[in-house]
Amino acid sequence: MRADLVLVGGGLANSLIAYRILTEEPDFPLLVVERQTSLGADHTWSFHDSDLTDEQRRWIDPLIAHSWPRHELRFPRRRRVIESGYNSVSSARLHGIVGATLGDRVLFGAEVADVSADRIRLADGVEIRARAVIDGRGDPGARSLAVGYQKFVGLFVELSTPHGLDGPILMDATVEQLDGYRFVYTLPLTERELLIEDTYYSDGPDLDPARIGIELRSYAARQGWEIRQVTGRESGVLPIVLSGDIRAFWADGAIDVARSGMRGAFFHPTTGYSLPEAVALADLIADARRSDGRSLFRLTRRHSIELWDRGRFFRLLNRMLFRAADPDLRYRVFERFYGLPEPLIRRFYAGRLKWTDKLRLLLGRPPVPIGRALRCLFAPSPSVAPGTTTRRG
């Protein structure tokens, strides 16, 4: 069995790579190998209008399930509406459109036992040869990154009456602060359907879905929303990187194999958003789609290191959040941040801060103890704790 390009894993990153290539060259001989029975698993990926270029937005537009012209933030001492577009891609939409585009070029229910730059071996012994292989199977289990965690449990709910929202609530931090910085994230899908997620910026990765499900039902009741039925669930644990060695991260695992998604550390270092980086990587791979495996390895490794270098300031902010702020007062960091001008907020999410933005974020009285803030600012990056790894649920 053979294909020019084999994409191991059918998550967001590899699905977008396949879709981007096939929209340019419909007959390109690629193959997606996924162990589940659908693409994307049970996830929702969101992004701001300003996260993508106009050209990127054009090609990804068919995959967008929902768009809103504005979104809201709620904190104990601040409530604000941001007049900036926000969009979501659902796993159902991803599977439907990318799956139809792939046709028979996707192999579901296939467990991969081994990968190299130009072939993979399945658990049943079948070998698939290729000009190039890209590994996008999520967390590689590396011990080279020190991280905190953004973790969440979400319920898709149908209400008895309309919810009354005209846009998402990206953060409602008026809830009780538990297990670090906690907020509820709400997407209005139809006039009676919502995705409600309980989210934590936490020191540990553990989740209690049963308890959080009860918390979410209680939150909905306080908003005056009567849940008629729960139609779906999703959960996840995303890394918030504090420090590490990106070259050591790439040295772990299969030698000379290109990577995508979480496996290549392609995500925003503070927000954990992965769709904008997945889109950028898909553009890069589409332009180099006839390269051999080792060439794609060098390309994706170099792109990951460049992203890491650009994220140095964000990792400093992460250390101030996780190391300087008391867990139950971390919300104050975000409460202050969302008082800043909208253009700065948009550049923050897009990962394109100006030097003046960085000064604006650091100047003034920080919403954390000043001594701890200064230690985070001037001390060397903390070493990686033994056994620390990136994880995703």
Image: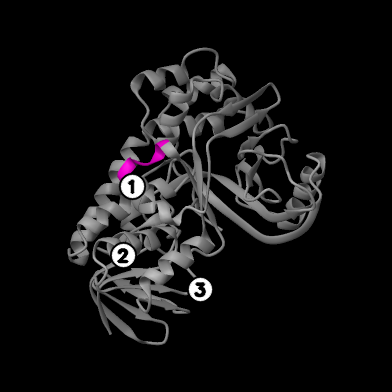
Query: From the viewer's perspective, is residue 105 above or below residue 39?
Result: below
Mark 2 or mark 3: name the one nearer the start of the chain.
Answer: 3
Query: From the viewer's perspective, is residue 76 above or below residue 384?
Result: above
Query: How far apart in space, not on screen, are marks 2 and 3 (Cα)?
Result: 18 Å
**Residue 97, image x, y percentages:** 44, 65
Query: How far apart in space, not on screen, are marks 2 and 1 (Cα)?
Result: 21 Å
Mark 2 or mark 1: name the one nearer the start of the chain.
Answer: 1
Taken as a whole, is the magenta stretch helix, strand or loop? helix
Mark 3 or mark 1: name the one nearer the start of the chain.
Answer: 3
Circle 2 residue = 134
In front: mark 3 or mark 1?
Answer: 1
Magenta region: 50-56
Query: How far apart in space, not on screen, are marks 3 and 1 (Cα)?
Result: 28 Å
Residue drawn at x 47%, y 14% as measured from the top left: 363
Residue drawn at x 40%, y 21% as measured from the top left: 357
Asked if one can make out residue 321 in the rendered structure from this viewpoint, the answer is: yes
> Tag 3's secondary structure?
loop
Circle 1 residue = 56
Residue drawn at x 35%, y 48% as measured from the top left: 58
Residue drawn at x 45%, y 62% as measured from the top left: 11
**Crowdedness of circle 3 by 10 Å Cα count: few (<14), some, many (20+)?**
some
Amino acid, disc 3: Gln
Circle 3 residue = 36
**Crowdedness of circle 1 by 10 Å Cα count: few (<14), some, many (20+)?**
some
| Pick the front one: 99 or 242 | 99
* Residue 201 relative to residue 24: left or right: right
